Every structure is written in structure tokens, then in C-alpha cells.
């Protein structure tokens, strides 16, 4: 949904850098709490195949996790002027989800509140299922709008495949996804009854159809368990000809290459950590 090209070299808060990756991971497991800050800069903001801003954006995300429950505060900052001709923060989307305690598969259920200066606030519930393995990881995602008779009330689903390759200190990730929207969702996102500043599509697309597809390559380097950076390239396109026609009529790209660079920081607050002391690279927990 978001990929980038530029530079983001900002670090917030303090970070432990002395322990080894193994002992840091052990502290996370023992304390049961993590806080992570992701700071990507992207060459464009594309959401489910629809280009929201074809200029550079900054999309910070703060995630707090405890007992399998995660809180995420995600925002979009338009570095270049967006559809309304303004720079600055244009969207804030808090979300919450719970990772179910399954061993063979990864299952998360949650909800998101979308608040943009371009549209009214909307809400979604979602389920994400993944099956990690050493060959290729399939992922299925389903999102259902919870907005009654107004706003985004449709269903969007996606299927994805991904594979990681370890190369010394680097991880290369290949991923491909395809999305599907029901009539309510496609009409909401791709079809608008009235044009907004000549940008929003004027063709209503009330049909169930495959919407967007994408392929992506990411290279990530972890300095330790608490600091990592990555660079990505992604190609996004639209499957459905009617949706493509609606977007093109509004002057919106239907296929786009996006680049990014990102810095991620994982913070282990001392007041959440079990009492103990670093001794020779190991965190010794007090009884």
C-alpha cells in the first residue's frame, strides 16, 4: 500500500545498541513488550491501486505490542503537494489488532479508523492469515467497511505470495499481490459522482472485480535487533479495464513504479523490561 524513493534518516527515542541480537530478542520475549517506529519516505502514496499522491510522501508508523495486542498509529505527510495542492499531514489512521495464538499459521484480527482531510472518517474490520514457511509464504487479507449507508462500506480482499532470501547481513524479499473489491468498495474508491478539482474519477464503477496487482523487491539490513534500514521498489497496476478507464479519465496513473527508503527502530523501554543487569553481553534477569 505504500512504497518509496528518497532518504529518511531520523531516529526517535533512545535505543539499546550494546547487547547482541540474541540477547535483545530474549529480552523482548521475557518482557512481552515492544515499541517500533518505522519511518519510510516514498516517491508516491498508492493505496490499493489508487494513487492518492504521485509526489513524495513521509509515512511514519508507531506500533506498540503487548500480550499479542498491537496498537498502530500511522500517518501520511505530503512532502510534495497532494490532490488539494497542500503540503503537510493529510491522513491519520490508528488501528488495533490481536495475533491469535496459533502455531502452524499466523492469524490477526483487528480494526482501522481512517481519517483524511480529503474525506469523511471511515472504519474497517480485517482478518489477515499467513502461512510462513521456507519455500514461499502465502497471505490472505480481508477488509470489511463498517460505515452503514455512508462512506466506505464495501469489502476488499487480497492474496499475496512472498519469499525471503538471506545474503550475509542482508535480507532480500520478493512479493506479489492481487486485490479484489466488491461493488460497494470499487464504487467508493474508484468511482465518484462529482469530480474534485479534476482529480477524482467521474465514472461510477459499481462492479465486483479484480482491482490492483503489484510486485515488489525489498532489500533490508539489520544493524542489530533494534535498528534496521531498507530500500524498496514496487510496480503497481490495475487489472480491470473499466476501473482503469475511470482513473485515466480523471488523470490518475493506473500503473506506477514506486521507490522507497526506510529506517526502523525497535525500542525496549527499561520500565517495561524485567529487572536485571547486562553482564558480558547477556541480560541477567533478577529473581
Image (spheres, rainbow, N blue to C red):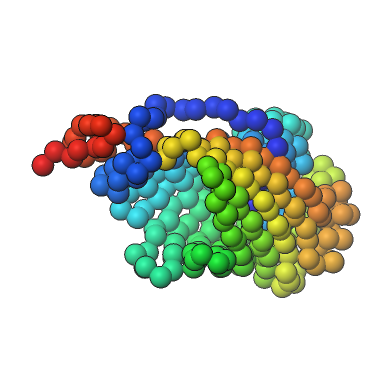
Give whichever of 283, 252 is nearer the camera.
Answer: 283
Q: Quadrant of residue 224?
A: top left
Can you say whether 27 is above or below 215 in the image?
Answer: above
Q: Quadrant of residue 162?
A: bottom right
Image spot of residue 121 (x, y percent): 57, 49
Question: Seen in the image, is 190 located left or right of residue 148?
Answer: right
Residue farthest toward the bottom in the current orientation of the protein: 208
Question: Seen in the image, is 144 located left or right of residue 217?
Answer: left
Q: Is residue 180 visible?
A: yes
Question: Seen in the image, is 192 located left or right of residue 40?
Answer: right
Question: Seen in the image, is 270 located left or right of residue 285?
Answer: right
Q: Quadrant of residue 79?
A: top right
Which residue is depicted at the point 77% across and 41% down?
A: 54
Image spot of residue 85 (x, y percent): 76, 33
Give whichever of 70, 221 is nearer the camera.
Answer: 221
Which residue is depicted at the point 34% across and 40% down?
A: 24
Image spot of residue 26 (x, y percent): 30, 46
Can you say whether 115 is above or below 85 in the image?
Answer: below
Image spot of residue 113 (x, y percent): 52, 51
Can you say whether 116 is above or below 211 in the image?
Answer: above
Give whichever of 76, 234 is nearer the camera.
Answer: 234
Amino acid at each position: 500500500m505504500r512504497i518509496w524513493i528518497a532518504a529518511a534518516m531520523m531516529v526517535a527515542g533512545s535505543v539499546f545498541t550494546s547487547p547482541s541480537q540474541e540477547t535483545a530478542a530474549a529480552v523482548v520475549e521475557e518482557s512481552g513488550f515492544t515499541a517500533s517506529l518505522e519511518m519510510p519516505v516514498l516517491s508516491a502514496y498508492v493505496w490499493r491501486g489508487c494513487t492518492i499522491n504521485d509526489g513524495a510522501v513521509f509515512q511514519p508508523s508507531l506500533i506498540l505490542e503487548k500480550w499479542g495486542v498491537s496498537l498502530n498509529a500511522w500517518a501520511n505527510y505530503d512532502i510534495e503537494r497532494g490532490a488539494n495542492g497542500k503540503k503537510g499531514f493529510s491522513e491519520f489512521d490508528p488501528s488495533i489488532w490481536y495475533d491469535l495464538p496459533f502455531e502452524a499459521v499466523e492469524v490477526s484480527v483487528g480494526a482501522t479508523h481512517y481519517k483524511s482531510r480529503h474525506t469523511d472518517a471511515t472504519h474497517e474490520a480485517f482478518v489477515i492469515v499467513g502461512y510462513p514457511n521456507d519455500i514461499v509464504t502465502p497471505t490472505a487479507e480481508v477488509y470489511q467497511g463498517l460505515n452503514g449507508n455512508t462512506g466506505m462500506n464495501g469489502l476488499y480482499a487480497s492474496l499475496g505470495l512472498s519469499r525471503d532470501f538471506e545474503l550475509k547481513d542482508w535480507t532480500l524479499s520478493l512479493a506479489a499481490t492481487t486485490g479484489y473489491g466488491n461493488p460497494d468498495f470499487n464504487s467508493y474508491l474508484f468511482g465518484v459522482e462529482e469530480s474534485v478539482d479534476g482529480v477524482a474519477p467521474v465514472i461510477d464503477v459499481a462492479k465486483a472485480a479484480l482491482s490492483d496487482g503489484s510486485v515488489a523487491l525489498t532489500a533490508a539490513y539489520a544493524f542489530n535487533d533494534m535498528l534496521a534500514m531498507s530500500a524498496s521498489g514496487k510496480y503497481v497496476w490495475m487489472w480491470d479495464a473499466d476501473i482503469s478507464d475511470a482513473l485515466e479519465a480523471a488523470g490518475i496513473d493506473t500503473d506506477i513504479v514506486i521507490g522507497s527508503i526506510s529506517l526502523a527502530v525497535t525500542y525496549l523501554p527499561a520500565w517495561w523490561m524485567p529487572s536485571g543487569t547486562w553482564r558480558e553481553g547477556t541480560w541477567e534477569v533478577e529473581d
